[in-house]
Amino acid sequence: MSTRLRLLAVRELLRARDRGWPNPPVVLRPLKEVNKWMDNMHKVDHEISVFERTQLWMSLRLLHGLDLDDFLLGSRHAYTVVSQLLQDGQWDALAPLVQPTCLDAMRDLGGGGLPTDGDESISIVSAVLSSAHLLEPCERTGVLPGTAHLDVKFTALQGVTLHDLQHGATSLAMAPRLQESMWTFEGVVRADGDDDDAAAGWQVRDISWQVWEVEQAPSRHAGCRPSPHDR
């Protein structure tokens, strides 16, 4: 992380302190550890803007109990399991893994699932943290202290994609296509870092994606083009 970004982030933290920290003050994650995460392109999305990087840096410092390595590893597992269950239309099995509004959207999208005569393999190329937001606790709405939204950007090769689910594709004998998607996870980050119980509580809140397909055209060379069908 550059010196300028660090100064901007520290300035925002000082402003927050002046507005009144909680009593006692929150425990921040060590600066050196967060900077190491931010500099690692295999853990943090390096395509986000300067402002987004500053915001992410501050959020990671506030999420003192977050183990980013474990979270990203778990998110990869969630990607594979949720994708396969969604493809098969196994709504009861999906219910503990995704939030109710997301499950309803999946039902509308996927119907009764897809035929299984295509390439169902999933190869995750990358999974990086793109943003993080710590929610304000609210007893009335049931938002617990430490509740966070973490956005993970995935790049994966898949034969069956959410694009197929959206359009009810029946011919799935296609080579794996590159799919980029953003998954929002919601869960509770415990301040003491003991997230054994909380880890099981992470749920998918939202998914947005874009599919890239290899297209053969006689008038031009084969290339990648973005599918116009995004959710």
Image: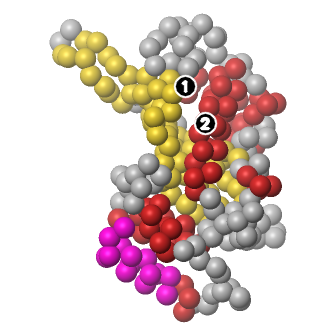
**For mark 1, does the 10 Å Cα neighbourhood hold few (<14), some (14 to 19), or many (20 or more) residues?**
some
Label 2 crowd (10 A; few <14 / some 14-19 / many >=20): some
The answer to whether residue 123 is magenta is no
Picture quarter containing residue 85? Answer: top right
The residue nearer to you, when weighing 171 against 60, is 60
Query: Where does residue 10 sit, x and y in percent of width and height?
Result: 44, 81
Asked if residue 147 can be seen in this view, the reply is: no
Pick the front one: 197 or 145 = 197
Q: Identify the residue position indicated by label 1 in the image.
A: 122
Q: Where is the N terminus found, in terms of image quarters?
A: bottom left
Q: Amino acid at mark 1?
A: Ile
Q: Is residue 20 above or below residue 217?
A: below
Picture quadrant of residue 168: top right
| Cα separation between marks 1 and 2 | 9 Å
Q: Which residue is mark 2?
A: 79
At 65% from the left and 25% from the top, the residue drawn is 84
Q: Is residue 128 left or right of residue 203?
A: left
SS class, disc 1: strand
Residue 77 rendering spot, x and y as whole percentages: 64, 37
Residue 133 higher or lower than 127, as above or below: below
Q: What secondary structure is marked by label 2?
A: helix
Contact? badges 1 and 2 (CB < 8 Å): yes
Decide whether the magenta segment is chiefly helix, strand or loop.
Answer: helix
Report x, y in % for residue 128.
48, 48
- The amino acid type found where label 2 is placed reads Tyr
Identify the residue shown where x is 66% and y is 86%.
25
Picture layout, residue 35 above or below residue 222: below
Residue 167 placement: quadrant? top right
